[in-house]
Image: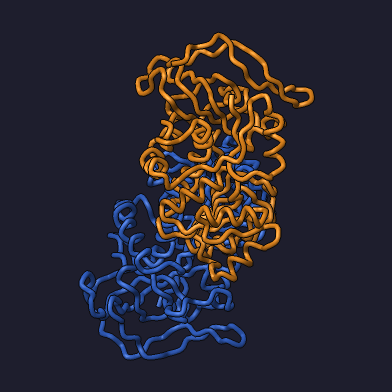
Chain colours: A orange, B blue
């Protein structure tokens, strides 16, 4: 069992040139309802890159340090904490602060390490699990037997989303930017992966005779994808946005929304309160953990960087070459 | 009790010049699950005007005659009909065919005449009741205490929608095209009615400190209203479209959809199946009928035209001068 250190190493952002450096500061004391975690591995997210640029400021009550998810060992527990004990191995959605060798997290956002998972694999789980569960299952209510299209299939959220939708009975279609990624995503369970750089996904879906038959669409692209999503969605189809990488602005013909009774919605995870996330965690434990521990769902870890190579890790994500999660190890 | 006639009078559309005339044809025989109704009054809807122009063709299994709602007396019942008897007074959502002195309707779309209602008032109910219930309560799930904005407040759907939302605990805002209509809608229960021709509703809502606080929006306008609706909606707000009178096409910035976790959806009533409408009817009987029979909700009848003045009735609706329902009496 590890002892609690006095200082922690964390990744600081230079506010002038937005460069990164490893700094030291005193270890935080967990507030009531929080645990202090010795971090072994932290997951990278696109939100980190935005936060670094100053484009996605953390909520007022959140840690200003980057990093939304970690895996590690409980070092100390705050008051009112009864379900986790010192020494427990957990993964957690942090309220910021994951890019550090020691961090706090609310207990409602902590999950056990699934049996058979390494710390590195477990650090790839929280953000993707909660994002997929909330958007595809809570907001879009995907049902077994329905058809789901997941854009950005090669991302951490995309790869885990494909595996989860398949495991829970969905028929999965996806898009990615290279043929190699598309082949890998078909191996992962997608019925058809579409290379959006060489193919028009609306056209491919139409050729597959699936126009007006896609029940749920998870999109982080937006822009010109918005109209195409509306065009291919099934009656009572649900389209959910988690980002607008291709742009939040588009000229759209909404007529099919009415005729097909579509629902267009979206969310960011971070803006939601602890109670909402606690419900997600409970449902994930019930519906997804059996598949993680049974081996039918496994996150894909693209590459692991040591903490002091965080600049290289960011550059790798920015390049878009990765498939699955990029992880920092402490 | 009325006897079943051999022929019925109905409104025919001249396919050349789209003019209307009163014609005669044999009375239809109710199919299993249908009743034959001697019609006393029929409600006008904007959809009728579109159908007349050839822009809203009826579904393949529907009557090609205009008219989506009637009130009258049951003349004969089809096989499998046990809940209605010859002589019962009912109002009904037809599957087309309301512009006639005798028509059929599926029993799942028949409702009793609320106690104290005339046939003319009852003919104003079915389309507006089902549209309001389905969109504001089933799709948008308006809760007591929430704020709802109803565009087109002076329409048949708008006026009944305002009364229903108020009766079920909503705080109602609305838009209309004249100050006189706005005053009437405030008397009907709207906290504030906005004249959209002289005021910008987004600006008024902002001045009232209600920006980001409108939980549900029912819109039949679209066009430039689409962005404004998104801008004023509360976190987890629901925006529901039932038409796009100002246009189905718009350039939209969807960023607030994500940040506020909005839901944009819409529907047409006619495209939905009998089972879906039967659920609406059951819920309306439970939740709205007590308010109709208790007198807290009353439809507003704008003007009544005899059947042979159907051209004038259409012209009156086209002019947009009306407030509440326009009714044809047979």
Q: Which residue occupies the foreground of this view, A54 or B111? A: A54
Which one is nearer the viewer's eye here, B54 or A310? A310
Report the quarter where the C terminus of chain B lies. bottom left
Q: State the residue at coordinates (45%, 76%).
A: B306
Vertically, is B63 above or below A31? Answer: below
Residue A1 image offset from top left, x and y in percent: 43, 16
Residue A158, placed above or below residue B66: above
Q: Based on the displayed image, in which of its 4 quarters is residue A325 positioned? A: top right
Horizontal side, residue B121 vs residue B256: left or right: left
The location of residue B207, given as percent across then percent down, is 63, 36
Q: Residue at x 68, y 52 (%)?
A: A223
Quarter holding the N terminus of chain B? bottom left
Residue at the outermost right position: A17
From what the image shows, is residue A264 above or below residue B101?
A: above
Toward the viewer: B76 or B251? Answer: B251
Indicate left or right for B239 with B223 as reference.
left
Question: Is A317 in front, or is A40?
Answer: A40
């Amino acid at each position: 069992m590890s002892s609690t250190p006095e200082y922690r190493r964390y990744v600081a952002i230079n506010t002038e040139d937005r460069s990164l450096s490893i700094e030291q500061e005193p270890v935080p004391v967990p507030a009531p309802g929080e645990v202090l975690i010795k971090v072994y591995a932290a997951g990278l997210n696109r939100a980190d890159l935005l936060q670094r640029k100053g484009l996605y400021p953390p909520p007022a009550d959140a840690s200003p340090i980057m990093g939304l998810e970690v895996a590690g060992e409980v070092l100390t527990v705050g008051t009112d904490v009864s379900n986790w004990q010192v020494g427990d191995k957990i993964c957690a959605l942090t309220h910021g602060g994951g890019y550090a060798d020691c961090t706090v997290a609310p207990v409602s956002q902590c999950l056990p390490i699934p049996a058979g998972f390494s710390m590195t694999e477990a650090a790839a789980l929280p953000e993707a699990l909660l994002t997929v569960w909330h958007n595809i299952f809570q907001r879009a209510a995907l049902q077994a037997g329905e058809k789901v299209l997941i854009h950005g299939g090669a991302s951490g959220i995309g790869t885990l989303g494909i595996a989860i939708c398949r495991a829970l009975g969905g028929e999965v279609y996806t898009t990615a930017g290279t043929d190699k990624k598309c082949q890998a995503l078909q191996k992962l369970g997608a019925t058809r992966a579409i290379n959006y750089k060489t193919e028009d996904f609306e056209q491919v879906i139409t050729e597959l005779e699936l126009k007006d038959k896609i029940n749920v669409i998870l999109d982080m692209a937006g822009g010109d994808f918005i109209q195409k999503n509306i065009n291919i969605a099934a009656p009572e189809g649900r389209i959910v946005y988690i980002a607008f990488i291709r742009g939040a602005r588009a000229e759209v013909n909404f007529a099919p929304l009415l005729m097909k009774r579509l629902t267009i919605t979206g969310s960011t995870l971070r803006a939601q309160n602890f109670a909402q996330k606690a419900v997600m965690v409970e449902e994930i434990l019930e519906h997804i953990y059996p598949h993680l521990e049974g081996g039918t769902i496994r996150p894909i870890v693209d590459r692991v960087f040591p903490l002091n190579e965080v600049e290289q890790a960011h550059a790798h994500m920015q390049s878009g070459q990765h498939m699955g999660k990029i992880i920092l190890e402490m």
